[in-house]
Amino acid sequence: MSRHENSVGSRNCECGHVADIRQSKRRGRYLYSLCDCGNNSATKEWFQNIWWHTTTFDRDVLKPVNINDDWKPKVTEPVTEKPSEPLTKVVTESLVDLTEQDFNAEPELAVPQSGPEPKRRGFLQVAGLLLMVACGMGALWSSV
């Protein structure tokens, strides 16, 4: 993506391209990102901290209101624990279960049970109910 005159810096986007970072002129002075994959104008503290701490700024920038100076990205450690049983054993046991089933059998169709039909409210019943509610609301309104 080509640099724009309003860009205040750049950072590597999650898609692999270089994203332009710009700053809003509105209240809060939030940062927002424009890249080939799209734009992101999230104002949540998490996004703002990522952009503030990982952007290479080209010029002076006002600090957005929700920046935490003690913020550090969460680093997840890789899992070093080995699984208790090999994955191939689990997969082959699942395949055995599938092959033991009889695929030529006719599927059982669920027959809906017939029960009492639900009551249907007529138009006049609904209109009467609405009229009673309106009269009740009018009586409450006039007594206040």
Image (cartoon, rainbow, N blue to C red):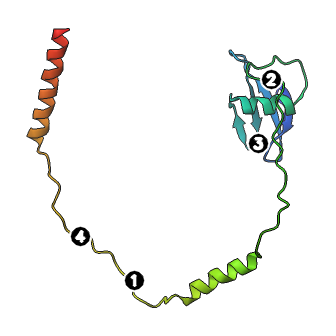
Q: Is residue 110 left or right of residue 11?
A: left
Q: Amino acid at mark 2?
A: Asn
Q: Amino acid at mark 1?
A: Pro
- Outermost front residue: 84
Counting from the top left corner in percent of width and height, residue 118 is at 17, 55
Q: Please report contact status of discs 1 and 4: CB closer than 8 Å, yes or no.
A: no
Q: CA distance from mark 4 to mark 3?
A: 56 Å
Q: Nearer the viewer, residue 7 or 14?
A: 14
Q: Quadrant of residue 138?
A: top left
Counting from the top left corner in percent of width and height, residue 75 is at 84, 44
Location of mark 2 (residue): 6
Q: CA distance from mark 1 to mark 4?
A: 18 Å
**Quick one: label 3 or label 2, which is nearer the N terminus?**
2
**Quick one: label 1 or label 2, which is nearer the N terminus?**
2
Location of mark 3 (residue): 36
As drawn, 98 above or below 7? below
Q: Please report contact status of discs 3 and 2: CB closer than 8 Å, yes or no.
A: no
Q: Nearer the viewer, mark 1 or mark 4?
A: 4
**Quick one: label 1 or label 4, which is nearer the N terminus?**
1
Counting from the top left corner in percent of width and height, residue 36 is at 76, 42
Q: Amino acid at mark 3?
A: Asp
The dot on residue 52 is none
Location of mark 1 (residue): 107
Q: Please report contact status of discs 2 and 4: CB closer than 8 Å, yes or no.
A: no
